[in-house]
Amino acid sequence: MKYIININDRIPAYIQLYQQLRDDIVGRTYIYGSKLPSKRLIAEETGVSVITVEHAYALLCDEGYIESRERSGYFVIFRIEDGFAVPAKTAGVPLENHKNNTSSYPFPYSVLAKTMRSVITDMPHAVMQKSPNKGCEVFRQAIAQYLARSKGIRANPEKIIIGSGSEYLYGLIVELFGYEKIYGIESPSYQKIEQVYRSCNVSVEKLKLGADGIDSDSLWNSKADILHISPYRSYPSGVSASASKRYEYLKWAEKGQRYMVEDDFESEFSVSKKPEESLFAHTTKDNVIYMNTFSKTISPALRVGYMILPEHLVTEFENRLGFYSNTVPTYIQLVLARLIANGDFERHINRVRRQRRKEMLSGG
């Protein structure tokens, strides 16, 4: 084996091991159906504890790369060669009735109020200025730094577009790609996705969701040019795309020179101890638009979202849509930038994740 753990690295040992094992699975060192080395063997050869190996294997299980078989070990269930994902054992939990709804974990009002006051005090002139069309630079920089830390997404701030919520950004996507395109959406999906696209008078194709993402037959028979998906957790079904399914999405987009809109609903509050994998971070063809909002993490009242464009679409966006004024007040952007920069935003997310893990383990 070739696994090397750097104990001086800021990345935890189990994440380092997870990443190396995942790369070997995707790279076909371990093919579909093959057995992984025992936990004890990996522990002995890398110098880490068996518990560390267990944590790495647990993450691989959670994401659909491997499965544990009683008294037999761990086996690869990921396959990429035929584009079909291994069916998940269980479907997602419908989020409409999900007892861990994130509205149960409000952002601390005292922290938000304090930050608002400090921004007004420290930046009285800046808050009265008009925002640049794509959003305030300090806010876009803060988002870029946060995504790099938390999700492994490397994005130049110039690729980030700020807008007043996801619905507004959906409309910008239509204007960017054009009204003659066909937009594929999950079925079922967040109702406003379909409503916005239909209000723009574009063709919408509803693609059936299975237990681990869009049904493969529906996907490959689709005429969609742009696929709008929530791979981490689709609303309202609660379905999460498996590792194989995410690679299938990437293959689908690559083969047809298509695009995907990755709507990263609620991923910040994942109970996993590692960043959730994004399609944006994994594409090699620069064909994914990443979207997220602050509605779940801070408050829906703020109406703030953002999207990251592929590099080659930035100039086209500026030429075609750069005349639009930004729809998020400068003041709100500066408040959010400070919450991210001073760590309050991530501290809240980490508190919620710890609480949700505790509730999950206790059955609460």
Image: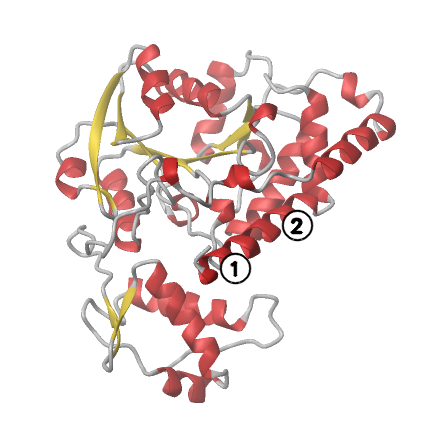
Quarter of the image for residue 195 reads top left
Position of residue 162 in the picture relative to residue 264 (left or right): right
Q: Is residue 334 above or below residue 74?
A: above
Count of marks placed on residues: 2
Q: Is residue 287 visible?
A: no
* Residue identifier under label 1: 358
How far from the left and from the top, in percent, is residue 305?
A: 54, 28
Please, what secondary structure does the residue beneath circle 2 have? helix
Q: Is residue 273 above or below residue 217?
A: below
| Residue type of the residue flagged with mark 2 | Arg
At 38% from the left and 45% from the top, the residue drawn is 232
Quarter of the image for residue 200 reads top left
Q: Is residue 36 visible?
A: yes
Image quadrant for the N terminus? bottom left
How far from the left and from the top, in percent, is residue 104?
A: 54, 40
* Residue identifier under label 2: 347
At 30% from the left and 38% from the top, the residue drawn is 237
At 75% from the left and 37% from the top, the residue drawn is 110
Q: Nearer the viewer, mark 1 or mark 2?
A: 1
Model colouring: secondary structure
Category of crowding for the residue at label 1, using alpha-carbon neighbours closer than 10 angstroms: few (below 14), some (14–19), many (at least 20)? few
Mark 1 vs 2, N-terminal side: 2
The dot on residue 325 is none
Q: Nearer the viewer, residue 71 or 65?
A: 71
How far from the left and from the top, in percent, is residue 18?
A: 42, 68
Please, what secondary structure does the residue beneath circle 1 have? helix
Quarter of the image for residue 130 reads top right
How far from the left and from the top, in percent, is residue 122?
A: 86, 30
Extreme residue toward the right, this view: 121
Position of residue 71 in the picture relative to residue 107 (left or right): left
Position of residue 46 in the picture relative to residue 109 (left or right): left
| Residue type of the residue flagged with mark 1 | Lys
